[in-house]
Image (tube, rainbow, N blue to C red):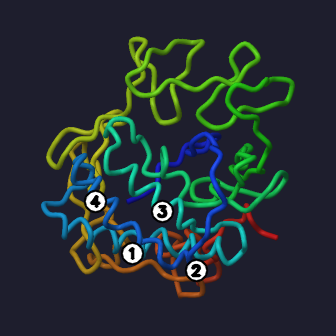
Amino acid sequence: MRPIVVLFAVACSTPVERTPSTTTSATAYCELTADAFCDYYERCDRMAVDTLAECQNTFLETCEGVFEPRYVALEARGDLALSTVGLGECAQHLRTVDCAQQVFDLDGACDAVWDGQVSDGGACGPGLESFVCDDDTTCVLDLSFCGTCRPVVPLGSACGDGLRCADNTSCIEGVCLEDAAVGDACDDEQPCRLGARCADNVCTSNTIVGLGEACDSGRRCQYRAECVDGVCAQAPLLGDACTGALPCASGWCDSGTCESFGEPGAPCDAPQECLGGTCDAGACGELTSACLAE
């Protein structure tokens, strides 16, 4: 399950006032969220599996093999913390949220799961590394695809002249106003929230389609599926047979079999073999990108 990365914008919701949260180790993230996310995936038909148990097994394999190690690396740097309060808010939110409104997994109340620890002027990056910015800032990427945490002003506040609105709000006539949600009216002066697009003056999200259905940029395959030659096909798990045309769900295709990504320092021949996405001098690189290099 790959996060949706939007270049030059960050997939986070508007910062909200909340009580200081206690934290737990990032190593527990996948186990603590598997039930809530799989209940939501089953209800909203977001994963290409037949049973809840299959969803949970797939979620844990992909989460632990792809995402959790990166979160742990960011936690070790002091850039990110896993909020126990946020975990509870997210689980409650996923039970009832309208499926069309949950554009990204960590939208809505689920944006409280991770507490960014980096303040104004600190380094951030694309994807998961955008989460490191604290509630008073947002990650602004430059042409190098690295970024800096920059201050934002809250909903209803004055903007412009260097004052940036929070994510999912826009500066309209000098005031930060909320972006339109899926199903709301939109136009040039009323943009849609991140991940939605304005079509015929109504905000819409991508259509999620099942196995064997036609797919393209507007018709996205479910989790554990890939768009291959215009049709959604189920992605293989670790130990399953694979081909170059059908990527593995949580690893890389090594001589026709899905294998786990290499950890930092593991031998490699190419970046796609490594969890961090870099292979230097025959060894897998760090899990954090060069954007966060000290």
| Mark 1 or 2, nearer chain start | 1
Q: What residue is disc 1 on? A: 31
Task: Determine contact: label 2, label 4, CB under 8 Å.
Answer: no
Q: What residue is disc 3 on? A: 87
SS for tag 1?
helix
With respect to residue 193, does 71 lie above or below?
A: below
Q: Nearer the observer, disc 1 or disc 2?
A: 1
| Mark 3 or 4, nearer chain start | 3
Direction from residue 19 to residue 41 in the image, left or right: left
Q: How far apart are marks 4 and 1 (CA)?
A: 18 Å
| Mark 2 or 4, nearer chain start | 4
Q: Nearer the observer, disc 3 or disc 4?
A: 3
* Extreme-bottom residue of the structure: 266
SS for tag 2?
strand
Q: Distance between the residues labelled 3 and 2?
A: 32 Å
The kind of residue on which mark 1 rests is Glu
The kind of residue on which mark 3 rests is Leu
With respect to residue 76, does 145 lie above or below?
A: above
The kind of residue on which mark 2 rests is Cys
**Image quadrant assignment for residue 74:** bottom right
Question: What is the total number of numbered labels drawn onto the structure image?
Answer: 4
Disc assigned to residue 284: 2
Question: Residue 52 at x, y = what percent?
Answer: 19, 64
